Amino acid sequence: GENVEQHPSTLSVQEGDSAVIKCTYSDSASNYFPWYKQELGKGPQLIIDIRSNVGEKKDQRIAVTLNKTAKHFSLHITETQPEDSAVYFCAALFSSGSARQLTFGSGTQLTVLP
Amino acid sequence: DAGVTQSPTHLIKTRGQQVTLRCSPKSGHDTVSWYQQALGQGPQFIFQYYEEEERQRGNFPDRFSGHQFPNYSSELNVNALLLGDSALYLCASSFQGGYTFGSGTRLTVV
């Protein structure tokens, strides 16, 4: 099955700096790559996603890049703010016929220091 | 527009007991997936229901079972609870792609 690896597991940045989180996936049949933010006591919240036919997507301070050949995708947060502090998860959706499975990375604890 | 609703939010069960968790999907979504999230880890896929049938299953024992109703809502049942089943159980609904998660049910097995 699909395997998603995520790095780093923890990341501390100064307010206003950029943060980058990287993921790799194993199954070339995966075609959808969402990123989720999870705050304490809450479920994961979708913040941005990218499909396999697109190389880059941006939404204000957040961007995601995808390298299908290398099976890498990354989350970039610019001008970080204290409210960006949370756990971030990458995920990959495997689709084959009627089968659908969203596999998550292990998460990155992002701390933005004021 | 209500998102994904899960109930209960918290519960405590004794080892060996059985538990049922419930999920109402986001309006317009027809597919429900269940995940188990242990403390400090990413969500692990349990199974997915579509058109009232289990479409895909992760690496979980048969003690974990589910059901989807005609209104697309779903239940997760866990039998013979083990201490290791203590976790946050997340439900996600989807329709042709994007997954929306509920806030989860925190299950503690003592």
Image (cartoon, rainbow, N blue to C red):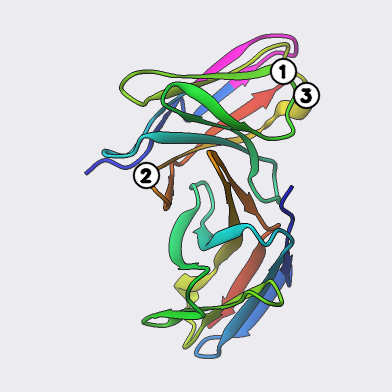
Residue A102, given in percent of the width and then of the height, sits at 58, 49
The chain ID associated with circle 1 is B
The mark nearer the N terminus, 1 or 3, is: 1
Nearer to us of marks 2 and 3 is 2
The magenta stretch spans residue B81:
no
Residue A65, given in percent of the width and then of the height, sits at 55, 79
Marking on residue B83 = 3
Circle 2 crowding by C-alpha within 10 Å: few under 14, some 14–19, many from 20: some
**Magenta highlight range:** B12-21
Circle 1 crowding by C-alpha within 10 Å: few under 14, some 14–19, many from 20: few
Q: Residue at x 47, y 88 (%)?
A: A79
Instruction: Identify residue for label 2.
Output: B95
Marking on residue A25 = none
Residue B74, given in percent of the width and then of the height, sits at 44, 23
Q: Are marks 2 and 1 on the same chain?
A: yes
Q: Are marks 2 and 3 in contact (CB under 8 Å)?
A: no
Distance, label 2 to label 1, CA atoms, is: 27 Å
Foreground residue among A106 and B49 = B49
The chain ID associated with circle 2 is B
Instruction: Identify residue for label 1.
Output: B62
The mark nearer the N terminus, 2 or 3, is: 3
Q: Are marks 2 and 3 on the same chain?
A: yes
Residue type pointed to by label 1: Asp
